[in-house]
Image (cartoon, grey):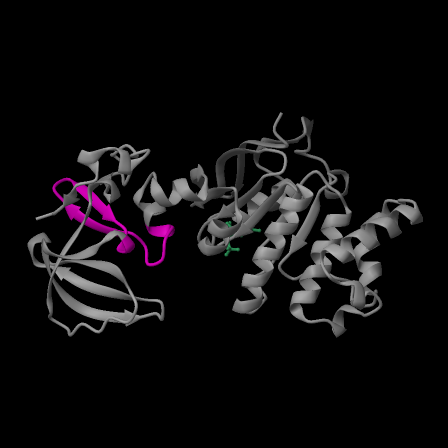
Amino acid sequence: MSQLEVKGLNKHWGDARAVNDVSFTIEPGEFVALLGPSGCGKSTTLKMIAGLEEPTSGSIHLNGRDLTHLPPGKRGLAMVFQSYALFPHLSVAENIVFGLRARRVAIEEQNRRLRQVTELVDLGAQLHKKPGQLSGGQCQRVALARAVVAEAPLCLMDEPLSNLDAKLRNEMRAELRSLQQRLGMTVLYVTHDQVEAMSMADRILLLNEGKVVQNGTPETLYGAPESTFVARFIGNPPMNLMQKDAQHLGVRPEHVRVDPKGVPAHVMHCDYHGADTIIDAVLPHLNQQTIKLRLPGHQQLPQGRELGLSWDRHHEHHFCLQSGQRLNPVFASPTLTPDETETHHVA
Ligand SMILES: Nc1ncnc2c1ncn2[C@@H]1O[C@H](COP(=O)(O)OP(=O)(O)OP(=O)(O)O)[C@@H](O)[C@H]1O
């Protein structure tokens, strides 16, 4: 039995369909990211699972128990919010065990779990401080610790790292993922940041306009996007999508290489990123469409420089021009199939 089972979930406000027939499951110990652009329905989905928003229709089961219409307090879920939601007048220790006290868990058990979790999230020296005396990263650790001590069957996280600066966010990502794996926590994690979803999740549910557009591992979303929307959303810079015949031909910037025998291109612009350079080029034989390529190191090519470009066949993605849906199957192991690894020239 799946830990969480969401079936045909809808949330309509008048004519607006914020969440439109969303179904998915989460297995015990899985870390699933609910990813998508602003306004796609991520938070509304999470709120319906938490019991903070009533679904228009659909059902939510946790370990076979129907939660759909239960009040939040009866669902037994843990939550971590972007805002941390700590009580400013309580100490770190009191914040962490707040839920356990409310549930009248025995004091010895509260202390045991508090000791265990403060060691895990390295808060031992801060237990008597108030949230106002902590850094953003420490506040987020307190919020995490509170979710961990609850020992809930599912932990819901709504953009928990978005208030932290870039360096700390990176550190906390690794910390959170390692904590989740060590404890075997089942997590549903809302984010609009594809890097966060790609680096942390076992599986990604990508939402667009209230619908799940792809449900798969990070590798599947990157390597076999089911539509042009997914192809553009995952990867930075996103996949090049060029109109050719009656299709969109997709190839990722990191898979394009300079090759004198390749398709002719003119350099437009070079963008140096430190470890690599992103080059924008025009393809005169493909209706002046543009293509991006990623080259290692610092490349300074003058505007107008002529290049040849090529890529391997197994790195091509084909999508229907009208529907945007994927047309080509995925090559399971490209290096094993000689005719699929040949270099392809588009012109
Ligand atoms: N209480 C409400 N009344 C009416 N419309 C709402 C309400 N709450 C959300 N919406 C709409 O539902 C849609 C989905 O909103 P939601 O907050 O779930 O998106 P999101 O993916 O979490 O976005 P973000 O990343 O910006 O938080 C949006 O179009 C939003 O305007």
The quarter of the displayed image where residue 118 is located: bottom right
On screen, residue 147 above or below 323: below
Residue 251 lies within the magenta run? yes
Give the magenta-colored segment's residue range.
Answer: 232-254
Q: How many marks?
A: 0
For the N terminus, give its image quadrant: top right
Residues 297 and 98: in front is: 297
Residue 279: image quadrant is bottom left
- Residue shown at the point (33%, 51%) measured from the top left: 232
| As drawn, 274 above or below 196 | below
Q: Residue pushed farthest right? A: 107
Write the residue at 62% across / 44% down. Answer: 187
Residue 303 or residue 82, whichever sits in front: 303
Left or right of 64? Residue 330 is: left
Q: Assess whether residue 161 is covered by the magenta stretch.
A: no
Residue 131 location in percent, x, y?
76, 68
Residue 43 in view (yes/no) = no
| Residue 258 visible in the picture | yes
Residue 339: image x %, image y %?
17, 34
Left or right: 197 as drawn, with respect to 255? right
